[in-house]
Image (cartoon, helix red, strand yellow):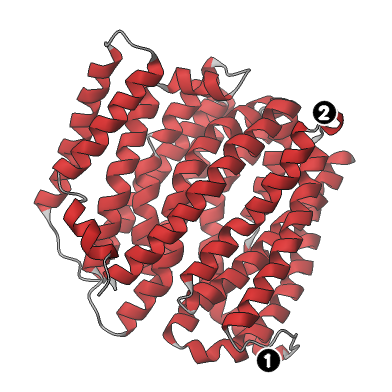
Amino acid sequence: MRRFFAKNLLFIVSLNLLIKPLWIFMIDRTVQNKVGHASYGMYQALMNLGLVFQILLDFGISNYNSTALAQNPRRLRVLFPAMLSARMILSLLYFSIVFCIGFLLGYRGWQLAMLLGVLSIQTLASLMLFIRSNASGLHRFKVDGLLSISDRLLMIMLCGFLLWYPTTAAHFKIEWFIGAQIVCYSFAILLGLFLLKRISDVRLHFTFDRKRIISIIRTTLPYASLIFLMSVYTRADTLLIERLTNDEQAGIYAAAYRLLDVGNMFGLMFAGMLLPIFGRMLAEKKSVQPIVQLCVNLLLPVSLLVSVAAIYFCEDIMHLLYKNATGDSIVVFVFLMIAFPAYSLSNVYSTLLTANGDLKLLNRIALLGVVVNLSLNFWLIPLLAAIGAAFAAFITQSTLALCFILFATRQTQLRRNLRWTLSFLFFALLLIAFGYGVKILPWSWLVQLSVLMVMGISTIFLFRFVSISSVQKLISKD
């Protein structure tokens, strides 16, 4: 199973390394530089409003579906039509409720029109995630990987044309960005349905069986409440900044958060693959210890290296990426990036708890995250604006990562290894020393950063978090 996981993970990571950074830095970042912090901040606030209430759109169906199919792939023919029908009903509910919430929050005119576009994006993205959950549940991870980049690849081509063709570039608006995403998601969904039909015997039709739909929604309720709580403590910050301060501060926060999204993208890839793998291994009473250790050994050292690099080179990185980077945006970036290791650990251990069926426990932990995050945000945002939200995110994610680790270790009887834990602490201290050392060298910051990265990666192998022999063993044929 370790070899199967590693091979498919390598394929998915390679695809996403080719496409998603291009989307984030070449398209998404360029859009913000084109339209300005204020317009992009409003767009991001509305996007996060939709994400907070995505519980109404998905209701935990994708996570439940992936786990259920991993345990019994033959259920696909029965589950898919009923779940597709349930999603249509939930989509209508989602549009109605979130639009009304937007109105009550004070959005009017073009803001409400933009909200409708954002809700369309979220609906299509959620449908795409559901289609992918069927592929991952069947352990067809290469198909899932191809689908995971299809929408972004289409957006790179369409938005790239709009951003760099002189006639359209001169008049580019945030509304065009929203419309382009709607078009590209629609084509990607058609591709997803085509591929799913090719790899399975799924029936692409609706089944308005009221009893079955109600049964599915009732079954997925614990997943749904978990997704809602997690959405609140991860996505409410930009919305709160925009409502409690202004669009400009929301844009500053979104600019810094974009780099955290890049790093967290890989943790989410791990989580997407780990859920069905953990589900099957736990159902078959197999030990998940090797997979957990492999993931932590890959994710945590890299996230620590990225965090240390962000601390030492924060000002240079932000000025390189954004033409109007400010002191506030640099501080926000630092606080968000030092939370990156906590995000990475949470992706592994929260997924393990989900696969183990500990949804009541997960909901309690997530509720703690909501209380901590909202309390800090309502206190700090009026005082420090975007900086306060970044500090709240760091405290929230660190607290939750610790909870996920402790409870996942207990619930799945993972072995405690003090030496393994301390090795990460020593590794982090060594990286901090490396960073201090390279900063005093009389070279350009790009050369200094490159030296730090080479030293950090070499130390990962020195500490044997990853070894060349183990990598060769994992990717070699049986």
Please identify the quadrant where the N terminus is shown: bottom left
Q: Residue 92 falls in which quadrant of the image? A: bottom right
- Specify few, some or many for label 2: CA neighbours under 10 Å numbering under 14, 14-19, or 20 or more: few
Q: Residue 9 falls in which quadrant of the image? A: bottom left
Q: Taking the image as drawn, is residue 105 in sight?
A: no
Q: Which residue is mark 1?
A: 211
In the image: residue 476, left or right of residue 80: left
Q: Which residue is mark 2?
A: 166
User: Of 377 and 16, which appears nearest the observer?
Assistant: 16
Q: Amino acid at mark 1?
A: Lys
What residue do we see at 19% from left, 37% from top? 459
**Dot 1: element:** helix
Position of 252 relative to 84 (above/below): above
As measured in the structure, the alpha-carbon distance from the residue carrying label 1 to the one carrying label 2 is 55 Å
What residue do we see at 44% from left, 81% from top? 70
Q: Taking the image as drawn, is residue 463 in sight?
A: yes
